[in-house]
Image (spheres, rainbow, N blue to C red):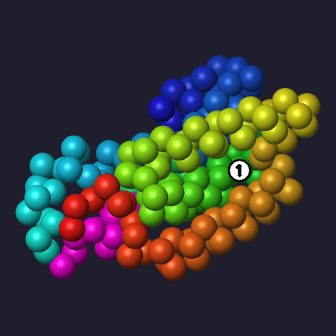
Amino acid sequence: MLAFGVLAARQTAEALPFFLVAAPVLPLAGIAAAYGPRVDPVHELLAATPLSGPRLLLVRSTAVLTVAFVLAGLASPLLPAPPGLSAAWLLPALAATSGCLALSTRLSVPAAALTAGGLWLAGVAVAAEAGGGWRVPFQPGAQLLYGCAAALLAVLVYRRRDRLDPGETR
């Protein structure tokens, strides 16, 4: 997905928003695919270990987030955009991932990832329409909001860590 975004943006500058909007969704897809009985062949075995449940979800989410950040970070300099704009996906990705984990205290992980991704895409569309352009969701004021949201959601996840993924049988 990132390679397609970079290639498209290098062909035409009008494709740059695709990369910036898609990059925060990448960790969400990874988290949804990295945890749960439907995607993990050894889920039943891990459920009996001390690392099961919330702890395993947080470890796997951190691993997925790290890999996604490294891949998108390597792709960012290849974009035909100023350095500030090509890195504008970082805080939205962190906020979306924190939102996914916070939603995982009420929903299953795949549903939480889908909801967080949908909210991100809807928010970008609404902000772009209301503000008059695709750069609005990536401006410094919006970045400050993403950073604050990520911090607040991380605190919420920490406080509700014992309730992560209620669909998980313990």
Q: Is residue 54 left or right of residue 156?
A: left
Residue sitting at x 38%, y 76%: 162
Residue 107 image point, x, y percent: 43, 53
Could you tell me if residue 55 is visible in this image? yes
SS majority, magenta: helix
The magenta segment: 50-63
- Residue 83 x/y as whole percent: 74, 50
Closer to us: 156 or 42: 156
Reply above or below: 93 against 114: below
Q: Is residue 58 magenta?
A: yes
Q: Left or right: 35 with respect to 137?
A: left
Quadrant assignment, res 146 = bottom right
Q: Vertical placement of 25 versus 10: above or below? A: below
Q: Position of residue 115 (x, y in %)?
A: 53, 43
Residue positioned 65% across, 53% down in the render: 92
The secondary element bearing badge 1 is classed as: loop
Label tally: 1
Whole-percent x, y for residue 164 in the image: 39, 66
Of residues 43 and 26, the one drawn nearer to the viewer in this rendering? 43
- The residue type indicated by label 1 comes to Ala
- Is residue 158 highlighted in magenta? no
Label 1 CA crowd tier, 10 Å (few <14, some 14–19, many 20+):
many
Name, please, the residue furthest toward the left: 45
Residue at which label 1 appears: 88
Q: Quadrant of residue 170?
A: bottom left
Left-right relation of 98 to 49:
right
Residue placed furthest toward the top: 11
Q: Residue at x 81, y 39 (%)?
A: 127
Q: Is residue 78 visible?
A: no
